[in-house]
Image (cartoon, helix red, strand yellow):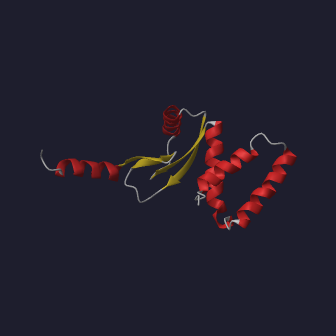
Amino acid sequence: MAILSDNNIAHAIYLSLKDKSLDEAHQTHKNILAFLARKHLLGRAAAILLHLKKIINLEKGIVSATVSSVHRLHEKEEKELVHFLKKRYSAKEITLTKILDQNLLGGFRVEANDEVIDLTIKNKIMQLQKYLTRSAV
């Protein structure tokens, strides 16, 4: 028996709705809901929608990123970060969600496309500690 992952379901929904007219899409939505109800998958709807959003964003060249920092990013820093992310992911557009996290000592942490770029002071200290305490070869 095949396992229906949230990502596979989202991909199937995307393909079934792609290039449909409004009337066809409306009927397809009904069929999708009936399928999810029949397979007892409605409880996973939020996760499926999250995967669907990622698929649509990928198709449109949009990357959603979350940046966590102690202080609000300056406009220049934000522009540099957006430019870096556009280049790194070959994206047309970057949508940033900014989170202020008072638990960070400094620096920032970026999460985008299932990747974490950790440039926090805490992480740098941990990396330095590993380097200094590693056994001599």
Q: Quadrant of residue 105?
A: bottom left
- Which quarter of the rendered picture does the N terminus lie within? bottom right
Could you tell me residue 31's position as x and y percent?
79, 57
Would you say 57 lies left or right of 102 here?
Answer: right
How far across and how far down the image is residue 122, in percent?
A: 33, 53
Q: Residue at x 85, y 45 (%)?
A: 22
Image quarter (top left, top right, bottom left or bottom right) of the C terminus: top left
Percent of width and height locating residue 121:
34, 50
Q: Nearer the viewer, residue 34 or 122?
A: 34
Q: Would residue 97 be found to the left or right of residue 30 on screen? A: left
Toward the left, the furthest residue is 136
Q: In the displayed structure, does residue 74 sit left or right of residue 9?
A: left
Q: Nearer the viewer, residue 31 or 21?
A: 31
Q: Tell me how many marks there are.
A: 0
Q: Residue at x 79, y 54 (%)?
A: 29
Question: In the orientation shown, which residue stands out farthest toward the front?
Answer: 1
- The residue lying at 52 percent from left, 45 percent from top is 113
Residue in view at x 43 percent, y 48 percent: 108
